[in-house]
């Protein structure tokens, strides 16, 4: 048992060093990547593309994310970006939370954070702020306590193609839930795979750095969060990851990789969608989404159009920062059995103001 623990610890240290070397030394820009896990700016919602144009070119060039996991309703919020790299998403968040809000970036690669740190004043001027509202922390994503991130201190946690790089994923997700406020949200994009991968792939620094070797099997992700008390996770968007490099294809072409964006709430939800006769109506009051709101891949709320929802979905809207943007009718005093709640058409995941770019 002790030998196994020591071996796992060695693996974790090796992976961490591979990540630091790959993102700190090997990659000089996102043009050096060997897969399609990272998305282009053109796939972003229009309001984010407008903000992106204000960011420093070096910050954008050193970005290696796989989606656009930036939700709506962030004004005045405290948002934590895990694996912030050069700070691209942190600076987008800086503009969205406003000068009263706070954007915190955490990363394990000093070279990436050096890029982020030296452009703080540039972005404060770009957004017309008297004071910079961002903070960067160097350290382990799975030990936020050591970085001074307090219990229930964060409204939203985002992560952009980074959690796959963390060796101790159960600890990382437990830390996320610790720092989130009740009703807080984890909204993240990452690479997932359709099977459990051989452990020896972690010895390949390219496969680790390209976010493939550490990709979670989707069902293991579901089980992991269920073990932490999160029994209802919502998929928002998904898309295939192309293995553009022939060497990478030979090594892991047997598996199917996807970039997936998830929405997770820190709420006491039921493990099945139950029907209580509740109805939700979107009021159209979210900035940058006046016509519709996409909660997940099977909930598209059009403005002023009542939509029957399960008890979990009602709670996701009523017990979070989205509450003031919805009219909820009904409670849980009368139960009608299971709710027919499942993924609808692909169209749902491609509409709305916060569309991820997977």
Image (cartoon, helix red, strand yellow):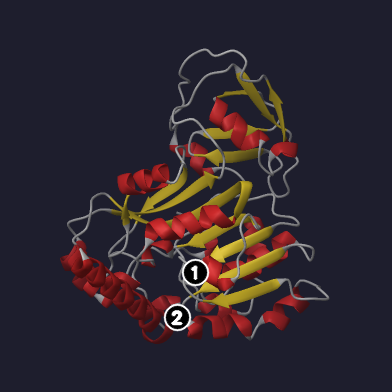
Quadrant including the C terminus: bottom left
**Mark 2 and mark 1: Cα distance apart in space:** 16 Å
| SS class, disc 1 | loop
214 sits to left or right of 302: left
Residue 126 screen position, x and y as percent:
75, 75
Q: Which residue is mark 1?
A: 83
Closer to the camera in the image, 341 or 249: 341
Q: Residue at x 34, y 73 (%)?
A: 209
Closer to the eye: label 2 or 1: 1
253 sits to left or right of 20: left
Closer to the camera in the image, 287 or 192: 192
Q: Earlier in the sequence, mark 2 or mark 1?
A: 2
Q: Residue at x 55, y 36 (%)?
A: 268
Q: Which residue is mark 2?
A: 29
Crowding at mark 1 (Cα within 10 Å: few <14, some 14-19, many 20+)? many
| SS class, disc 2 | loop
């Amino acid at each position: 048992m002790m030998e196994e623990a020591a071996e796992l610890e060695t693996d974790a240290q090796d992976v961490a060093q591979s990540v630091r070397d790959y993102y700190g030394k090997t990659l000089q820009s996102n043009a050096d990547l060997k897969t399609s896990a990272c998305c282009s700016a053109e796939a972003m919602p229009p309001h984010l593309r407008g903000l992106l144009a204000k960011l420093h070119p070096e910050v954008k060039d050193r970005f290696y994310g796989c989606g656009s996991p930036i939700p709506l309703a962030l004004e005045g919020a405290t948002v934590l970006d895990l694996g912030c790299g050069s700070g691209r998403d942190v600076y987008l968040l800086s503009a969205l939370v406003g000068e009263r809000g706070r954007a915190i970036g955490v990363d394990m690669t000093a070279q990436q954070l050096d890029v982020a740190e030296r452009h703080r004043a540039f972005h404060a001027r770009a957004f017309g702020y008297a004071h910079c509202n961002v903070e960067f922390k160097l350290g382990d994503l799975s030990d936020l306590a050591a970085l001074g991130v307090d219990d229930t201190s964060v409204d939203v946690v985002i992560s952009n193609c980074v959690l796959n790089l963390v060796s101790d994923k159960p600890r990382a997700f437990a830390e996320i839930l610790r720092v989130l406020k009740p009703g807080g949200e984890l909204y993240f994009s990452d690479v997932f795979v359709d099977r459990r991968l051989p452990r020896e792939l972690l010895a390949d620094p390219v496969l680790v750095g390209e976010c493939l070797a550490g990709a979670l099997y989707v069902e293991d992700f579901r089980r992991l969060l269920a073990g932490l008390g999160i029994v209802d996770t919502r998929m928002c968007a998904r898309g295939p990851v192309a293995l553009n490099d022939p060497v990478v294809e030979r090594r892991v072409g047997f598996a199917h990789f996807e970039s997936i964006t998830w929405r997770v709430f820190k709420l006491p939800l039921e493990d099945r969608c139950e029907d209580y006769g509740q109805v939700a109506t979107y009021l159209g009051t979210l900035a940058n989404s006046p016509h519709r709101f996409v909660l997940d891949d099977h909930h598209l709320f059009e403005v002023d159009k009542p939509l029957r929802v399960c008890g979990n979905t009602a709670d996701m809207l009523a017990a979070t920062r989205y509450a003031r943007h919805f009219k909820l009718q009904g409670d849980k005093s009368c139960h009608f059995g299971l709710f027919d709640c499942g993924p609808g058409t692909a169209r749902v995941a491609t509409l709305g103001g916060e569309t991820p770019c997977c």
